[in-house]
Image: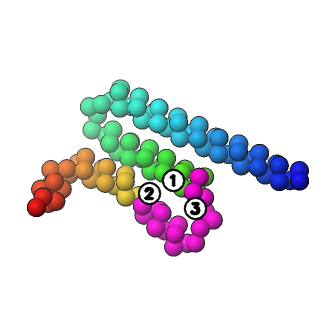
Amino acid sequence: MATARKTATATLIRMTLCWLGLSALTVLSVELGRWFHEAAWLPLLVAAIVWIKSSLVARHFIESRLAHPFIVWVLGAFIAFAPAALVLTTFYGAHIARWATL
């Protein structure tokens, strides 16, 4: 019984720290956007923050490390898609819009 309680407490602490990290990254994103809203490198930094936050959610809340390797691969591809799309639309938005129009 004591072992289960220690495991539950450790899990709660780990999830709380992860949540605090996600909250800190969110505040950091907002502040970076406010301070450096015209910087050309800001979308790269935001994409990196999105990737880190997505990885934290997958690892600590979805518990991807316990999933089948194929599911881990699909989840990793999904996590990589959003930052990649952010960077591509930032630097090549006009070309992508022209390509995507009917």
Residue closest to the eye, 22 or 43:
22
| Residue at x 27% of width, y 38% of height | 40
Residue closest to the eye, 46 or 9:
9
Instruction: Tell how many labels.
Output: 3
Q: Which mark is residue 64?
A: 3
- The residue tagged with tag 3: helix, strand or loop? helix
Side of 61 where 87 appears, left or right: left
- In which quadrant is the C terminus drawn? bottom left
At label 1, counting other C-alpha atoms closer than 10 Å, the crowd grade (few under 14, some 14-19, many 20 or more) is: some
Side of 67 where 12 appears, left or right: right
Amino acid, disc 1: Ser
Which residue has dot 1 on it?
Answer: 55
Q: Of tags 1 and 3, which is closer to the observer?
A: 3
Colour treatment of the image: rainbow
| Residue at x 43% of width, y 47% of height | 50
* The stretch drawn in magenta includes residue 83: no
- The residue tagged with tag 1: helix, strand or loop? helix
Contact between marks 3 and 2 (CB within 8 A): the answer is: no
Contact between marks 1 and 3 (CB within 8 A): the answer is: no
Residue 55 image position (x, y, % from top left): 51, 53
Which residue has dot 2 on it?
Answer: 79
Write the start and end of the magenta stretch as one range: 61-78
**Mark found first going from the N terminus, 3 or 2:** 3
Residue 64 image position (x, y, % from top left): 57, 61
In the depicted structure, whether residue 39 falls above or below residue 7: above
| Residue at x 25% of width, y 46% of height | 90
